[in-house]
Image (cartoon, helix red, strand yellow):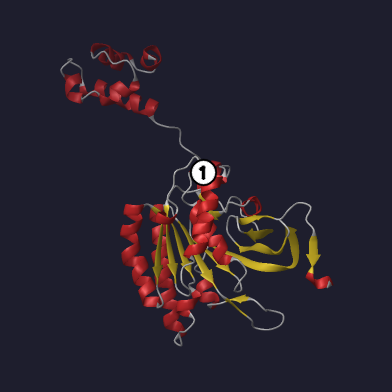
Amino acid sequence: MMEEFLATLPDEAKAVAEKAKIKNAEQALLTPTAHLLLQESSPHDIYVLKATAAKVMAKESIKVSDLFDLPYCMKWSRLSFGCEALDECTRGGVVTRGITEFCGASGTGKTQLLLQLSLMAQLPTDIGGLRASVAYICTEHAFPSNRLHELSKVFMNKYPKHDINYLANVHVEHIHHSEQLIKCCSERLPPLMSTERVRLIIIDSVAAVFRTYTDFVQRARDMRRLANCLLSLADKYNSAVICVNQVASISKKQPEVPCLGLAWSHLGRTRMRISKVPKQVICDDNFLTVRKLEVMYSPETPIAYAEFLITAEGAINVPQFPNVLNKLEK
């Protein structure tokens, strides 16, 4: 290493390195200039020595075109759903950039997926988690603690090597007004995220606190205030943000349209719709309704969909060769 570094130096700078017994570029950078001056070396030769060492130590720059060839796992972190079909559809799960919206009718399984994601977030990154805690904000119904407790037992059996207190790492808050929600995200979440390592924020649902507005201009302003808080936290802590939205029926041709209009849809990065498919599958001697997750828009994920089931064990793939009962044929 000494010969390779010295070979890159001019004769005068090489003499400085030999006097100071410098063997490599790192030593050349760390050796104080005052020490080199004591070796009766000229300031110009010392400058040449350190400049050459800096070039050797400098990392090769990355071209902008090379960034497009990086795997997705190196661009952003992703939180796995814990279900192969859903991860394949979304290219690895929920991205830790921007706001991801889950929309769908009541009873389609949105909350079930959120609870499963809350547990997945606590797992190590090498198996799809974030190794972090969760902030779960409820604006409609009481938090389903019993169901989370059931799923936590499933995760304990599924990942026995990881000693995780799943219930303690989910921080729950109940809020019923938009101003309280904005204050919570702007004032209470930042210290919680810095001290408890929260890397997943869930709001279930954002529509509940904004649908009652009669002043739509003010509603748009408040939604932007909320989005700005969430985007700032996501960017600072590399966190995933999921907001649940309700759907409304406009006509027979549009039976499930996400609420809050364009003012809200333009604030999100990704929108996923969750719905029920009119067919059932026999799984463990039970008839289970097939559900579908559809990526409606996303800047890094193609428009696609995946079918899945919700069981006592959580969200799982539809069996490859299921016994299917099509409701439309009955």
Give above or below for 43 relative to 164: above
Q: Which residue lies furthest to the right in this view?
A: 329
Element carrying mark 1: helix
Residue sitting at 45 percent across and 78 percent down? 209
Identified by mark 1, the residue type is Met
In front of the other: 51 or 199: 199
Q: Where is residue 73 in the image (x, y as percent from the top left)?
A: 54, 45
Residue 36 appears in the figure:
yes
Residue sitting at 34 percent across and 18 percent down? 24
In front of the other: 216 or 20: 216
Q: Quadrant of residue 69?
A: top right
Q: In which quarter of the image is residue 299?
A: bottom right
Residue sitting at 21 percent across and 23 percent down? 43
Residue position marked by numbered label 1 in the rendering: 74
Residue 304 appears in the figure:
no
- Quadrant position of the N terminus in the picture: top left
Q: Where is residue 247 in the image (x, y as percent from the top left)?
A: 59, 76
- Quadrant position of the C terminus in the picture: bottom right
| Residue 36 shown left or right of residue 180 in the figure | left
Q: Which residue lies furthest to the bottom in this view?
A: 214
Q: Residues within 10 Å of mark 1 (few under 14, many from 20)?
A: few
